[in-house]
């Protein structure tokens, strides 16, 4: 029996030739999709596993309401490299007007967005000018300066209001103050601006 003579002709494909994807193009599409996924998750991986400095700290509890009890000034920001990591150094001064001793408090710089607060531990520095500017406060203000280091990758692109948080080391009491300074995180840098 000869079945070949009566068999219907074979169809090669139901998809029109113009719409068929070649194997090489499939590989390119898969690689492009993987690249897109990498670009989305790479900053999170870098922050979690590779950055050692300039990361925010996690504090339990919520932020208190902003009170007018903290005098402060943010002098500037400067890009710097420490131990091979590119960081932004924010410097300025602040003090809690109701404190008896600033050494009794942990001081944090808080970057507040509409969605989240990022909290960074400050390092106290000396400021000779602050005691002269505020002689009415019965408080040792010689160490009211601060530095804080922030990794750009620790923040999402957006606008962040600069705030201060003081936590009493013994009692845990918190004092919070918003400022008129903002940090703008662009894809390439951090920029300190004053909002009027």
Image: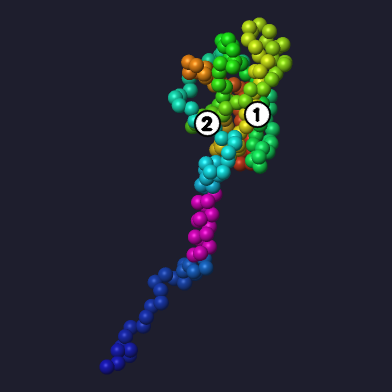
Q: Nearer the viewer, residue 77 or 194?
A: 77
State the residue at coordinates (52%, 17%): 168
Residue 161, given in percent of the width and then of the height, sits at 57, 27
Residue 158, given in percent of the width and then of the height, sits at 57, 35
Colouring mode (rainbow / by chain / secondary structure / one colour): rainbow
Q: Cα distance, mark 1 to mark 2?
A: 16 Å
Assign a secondary structure to mark 2. loop
Local packing at callout 2 (Cα closer than 10 Å; few below 14, some 14-19, many 20+) is few
Is 20 left, or right, of 193 in this rendering? Answer: left
Location of the N terminus by quadrant is bottom left
Is 2 left, or right, of 63 in this rendering? Answer: left
Query: Residue 108 lies in magenta, yes or no?
Result: no
Name the residue carrying label 2: 57
Q: Furthest residue to the left?
A: 1
Does residue 130 appear in this view? yes
State the residue at coordinates (69%, 33%): 78
Name the residue carrying label 1: 90
| Magenta highlight range | 26-39
Query: Residue 38 lies in magenta, yes or no?
Result: yes
Q: Earlier in the sequence, mark 1 or mark 2?
A: 2
């Amino acid at each position: 029996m000869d079945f070949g003579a009566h068999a219907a002709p074979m169809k090669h494909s139901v998809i029109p030739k113009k719409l068929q994807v070649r194997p090489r193009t499939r590989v390119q599409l898969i690689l492009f999709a993987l690249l897109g996924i990498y670009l989305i998750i790479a900053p999170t991986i870098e922050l979690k596993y590779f950055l050692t400095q300039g990361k925010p700290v996690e504090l339990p509890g919520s932020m208190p309401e902003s009170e007018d009890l903290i005098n402060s000034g943010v002098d500037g920001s400067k890009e710097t490299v420490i131990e091979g990591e590119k960081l932004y150094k924010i410097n300025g001064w602040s003090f809690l007007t109701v404190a008896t001793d600033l050494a009794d408090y942990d001081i944090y710089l808080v970057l507040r967005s509409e969605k989240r607060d990022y909290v960074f531990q400050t390092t106290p520095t000396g400021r000779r000018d602050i005691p002269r500017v505020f002689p009415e406060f019965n408080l040792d203000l010689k160490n009211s300066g601060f530095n804080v280091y922030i990794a750009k990758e620790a923040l999402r692109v957006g606008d962040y209001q600069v705030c201060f948080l003081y936590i009493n080391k013994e009692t845990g009491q918190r004092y919070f103050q918003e400022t008129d300074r903002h940090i703008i995180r662009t894809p390439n840098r951090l920029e300190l601006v004053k909002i009027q």
